[in-house]
Amino acid sequence: MNTFTNTNFKTSQVDLALLILRVGVGVLMLTHGIPKLQMLFAGGEIQFPGVLGLSPAVSLALAVFAEVVCSILLIIGLGTRWASIPLIVTMLVAVLLVHGSDPFANQEPGLLYLFLYLPLLILGGGRYSLDHLINTAQRPQLAKS
């Protein structure tokens, strides 16, 4: 029983939690981004809200970049902190601008994603990421400099 109330986390537990968070939120966001990617390349009229003075096509392209490209980067743990920034901005735009006047139920998914991206911005990808592999490979070279 003491295990469930313990607040002294091992680094390996945090790294595992970050892996689960990265892969889970990345895959779930891809389910939103891939239909937008298909819409972007469908060739027809783009039915997407233009925000912040941007055209619907530019707004859609930015959403696709965040929801597809940045989600893939999160899944593999490459540039995790950098990749989380466009996703955070996209969720803020969705919640505050696109669904700003909608009922809370329509804003809630964007807020949930936003709150999942914030720990990734703060903590990074963890040990089970390409970020960690790259940083580990560079350390011996930095020590020689």
Image (cartoon, rainbow, N blue to C red):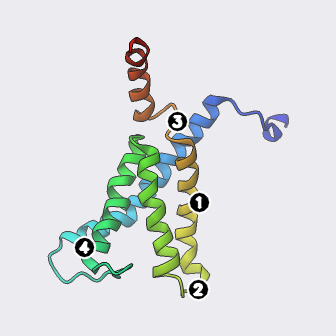
- Among the two numbered marks 4 and 3 on one chain, the one whose residue lies closer to the N terminus: 4
Which label number is shown at residue 39?
A: 4
77 over 32 or under it: above or below: above
Asked whether disc 2 touches disc 4, contact meaning CB atoms under 8 Å apart, the reply is no
What residue is shown at x 62% (from left), y 36% (from top)? 14
Disc 1 residue type (three-letter): Phe
- Among the two numbered marks 2 and 1 on one chain, the one whose residue lies closer to the N terminus: 2
Which label number is shown at residue 126?
A: 3
- Among the two numbered marks 2 and 4 on one chain, the one whose residue lies closer to the N terminus: 4
- Among the two numbered marks 1 and 4 on one chain, the one whose residue lies closer to the N terminus: 4
Disc 4 residue type (three-letter): Met
Question: Between 17 and 118, which is closer to the camera in this rendering?
Answer: 118
Alpha-carbon span between mark 1 and mark 3: 18 Å
Q: Mark 2 points at which residue?
A: 103
Which label number is shown at residue 115?
A: 1
112 over 54 or under it: above or below: above
